[in-house]
């Protein structure tokens, strides 16, 4: 019997450390497939993610071609397509990397049953996480609810397996003639914006794809890893790895990051010491914990983890959400973050916490509205980390920020953007204000505003809400559902 394999690429758009691809190519000639599946239960990708996906598929396609294979792209329902494709092409092994959203798990389970029923071997692998969500549990064998013991238990499992290199050559399996017409060109997927083309800032900032991810990691290990423990809070400098979109699309995996940290450290090539590396890996740990939460709470993006928050008294709808989305709240740090997001598809973690807290607490707008906006605009929009982080800020999540923790955008700005460089970059109409006024333009004297060319209410908005009023209103609302008085 001839041997033929299919590797179905999903959120694992890389060749190295991809055990499913390795198993397929070791088995025999391989069909490398990507399916854009937008009809089912799965959440449709947001605009920024679609842009990223287009670039990432292009990069993957080029690397496959260098190794002798083609990336076949189709727009289809995988449940219909795969059984037909496998039968037509005489494929006896199908491989993929596991996914963790409920709808994807259900689709994969059903599909596996169908294919196995047709006599095909199906093998699924972990390429996305250090540990599968079910591999870490409490001493009683239960899902974990608090990060610190979760991460301690995860680390106690020891080193993750060493990543496998990319296959040198891939023997291609041609697409059967009967299905050749179902293959589409990448541009036919219409993943990129055309009119208007709003992706200029994304193109300027990012190099999607496996090579771009490896370069980011290298730059980080020899650069901002030094002092990461402290520096990671500073949005005014490049202080973090910016690997999140690469991780989201599986252009790099956490095993590779883990081992690269150890190798660089052992070779004396890492800019940071053991405590910086530990801190960095613990952030990867938050990603793992988010997947653990998502796996055990499939409705994490839509339902309060803590049901007490179902009774939360959100404010009636106003123009405030639009002002937040557009970076026009009148609070410079919030506006800088929202504009950075719009321009580049990414926002620094410290600022994400501040803008999320401002939306939920000062403006009393449902965290799901913020989660949704981030889902559409982030290049790293992630089904687990986005939902878990929004619930963390809201106070409704597992191991969440305490309900009385309300980030003050002014003091956060003064502490983490002390010279106002971040605000000046993203809110240029305030650039000529002096450092003392950059986070509080409404308190600046008339002459300081005039000298800086700022006219409040015209060139830059007045604050959308009074901070003290918003804070007290939030505390009252939060106390009503927190169970604490
Ligand atoms: P680094 O500091 O270099 O961290 C390395 C990696 O660890 C990141 O790439 C990321 O994969 C992971 N990581 C870091 N912090 C966290 C965290 N708090 N939670 C989970 N994983 C983390 N991250 C996403 O990847 N996708 C999202 O959709 C997302 N939405 C968020 C929404 C809100 C409201 C908040 C407060 C945070 C969100 N985060 C999200 C987490 C975090 O802000 C980003 O992962 C981080 O800013 C990415 O930048 P980096 O790669 O430079 O991080």
Image (spheres, helix red, strand yellow):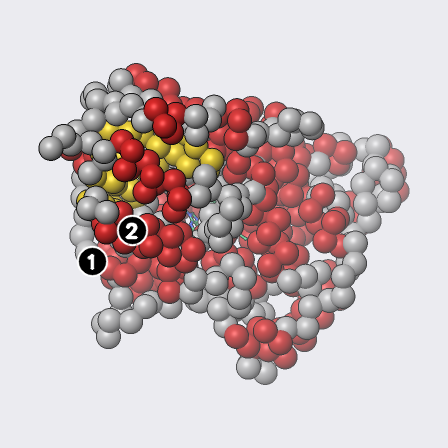
Quarter of image, res 266: top left
User: In the image, 55: left or right of 117?
Assistant: right
Residue beneath the point at 24% across and 75% down = 140
Residue beneath the point at 42% across and 65% down = 297
User: In the image, 275: left or right of 359?
Assistant: left
Q: Position of residue 172 (x, y in %)?
A: 25, 23
What is the distance, in whole Å, between disc 1 and disc 2 at their CAs?
38 Å
Kindly identify which residue carries mark 1: 156
Pointer 1 or 2: first along the chain? 2
Q: Which mark identifies residue 307?
A: none
- Mark 2, Cα crowd under 10 Å, few <14 / some 14-19 / many 20+, is some
Front-most of 340 and 169? 169
Q: Is residue 63 visible?
A: no
Front-most of 123 and 206? 123
Residue beneath the point at 24% across and 71% down = 141
Helix, strand or loop under label 2: helix
Kindly identify which residue carries mark 2: 114
Helix, strand or loop under label 1: loop
Residue beneath the point at 49% across and 50% down = 40
Mark 1, ligand 1, within 8 Å: the answer is no
Front-most of 464 and 197? 197
Q: Is residue 314 visible?
A: yes
Vertical placement of residue 435 versus 143, above or below: above
Q: Position of residue 319 (x, y in %)?
A: 79, 54
């Amino acid at each position: 019997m001839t041997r033929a394999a299919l590797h179905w690429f999903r959120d694992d758009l890389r060749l190295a450390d991809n055990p499913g691809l390795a198993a397929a190519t070791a088995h025999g000639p391989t069909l490398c497939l990507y399916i854009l599946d937008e009809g089912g239960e799965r959440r449709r990708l947001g605009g920024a993610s679609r842009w990223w996906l287009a670039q990432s598929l292009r990069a993957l396609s080029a690397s496959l071609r260098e190794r002798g294979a083609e990336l076949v792209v189709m727009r289809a329902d995988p449940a219909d397509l795969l059984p037909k494709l496998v039968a037509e092409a005489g494929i006896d092994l199908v491989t993929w990397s596991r996914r963790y959203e409920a709808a994807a798990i259900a689709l994969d389970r059903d599909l596996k049953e169908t294919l196995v029923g047709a006599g095909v071997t199906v093998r699924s692998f972990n390429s996305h996480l250090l540990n599968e969500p079910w591999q870490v549990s409490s001493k009683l064998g239960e899902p974990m609810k608090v990060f610190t013991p979760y991460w301690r238990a995860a680390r106690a499992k020891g080193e993750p397996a060493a990543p496998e290199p990319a296959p040198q050559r891939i023997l291609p399996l041609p697409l059967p003639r009967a299905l050749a017409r179902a293959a589409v060109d990448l541009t036919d997927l219409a993943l990129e914006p055309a009119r208007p083309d709003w992706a200029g800032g994304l193109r300027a900032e990012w190099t999607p794809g496996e090579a771009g991810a490896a370069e980011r990691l290298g730059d980080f290990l020899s650069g901002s890893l030094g002092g990461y423990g402290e520096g990671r809070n500073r949005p005014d400098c490049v202080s973090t790895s910016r690997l999140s979109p690469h991780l989201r699309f599986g252009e790099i995996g956490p095993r590779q990051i883990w081992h690269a940290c150890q190798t660089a450290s052992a070779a004396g090539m890492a800019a940071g010491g053991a405590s910086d590396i530990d801190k960095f890996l613990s952030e990867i740990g938050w990603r793992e914990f988010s997947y653990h939460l998502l796996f055990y709470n499939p409705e994490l993006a839509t339902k309060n983890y803590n049901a007490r928050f179902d009774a939360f008294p959100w404010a009636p709808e106003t123009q405030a959400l639009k002002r937040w989305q557009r970076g026009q709240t009148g609070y410079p740090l919030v506006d800088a973050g929202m504009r950075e997001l719009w321009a580049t598809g990414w926002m620094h973690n410290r600022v994400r916490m501040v803008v999320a807290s401002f939306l939920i607490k000062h403006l009393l707008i449902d965290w799901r509205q913020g989660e949704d906006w981030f889902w559409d605009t982030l290049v790293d929009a992630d089904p687990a980390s986005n939902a878990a982080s929004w619930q963390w800020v809201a106070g409704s999540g597992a191991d969440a920020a305490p309900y009385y923790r309300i980030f003050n955008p002014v003091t956060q700005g003064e502490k983490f953007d002390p010279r106002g460089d971040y605000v000046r970059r993203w809110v240029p109409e305030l650039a000529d204000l002096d450092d003392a006024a950059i986070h509080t333009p409404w308190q600046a004297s008339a002459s300081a505003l005039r000298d800086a060319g700022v006219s409040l209410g015209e060139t830059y908005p007045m604050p959308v809400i009074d901070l003290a009023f918003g804070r007290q209103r939030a505390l009252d609302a939060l106390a009503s559902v927190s169970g604490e008085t």
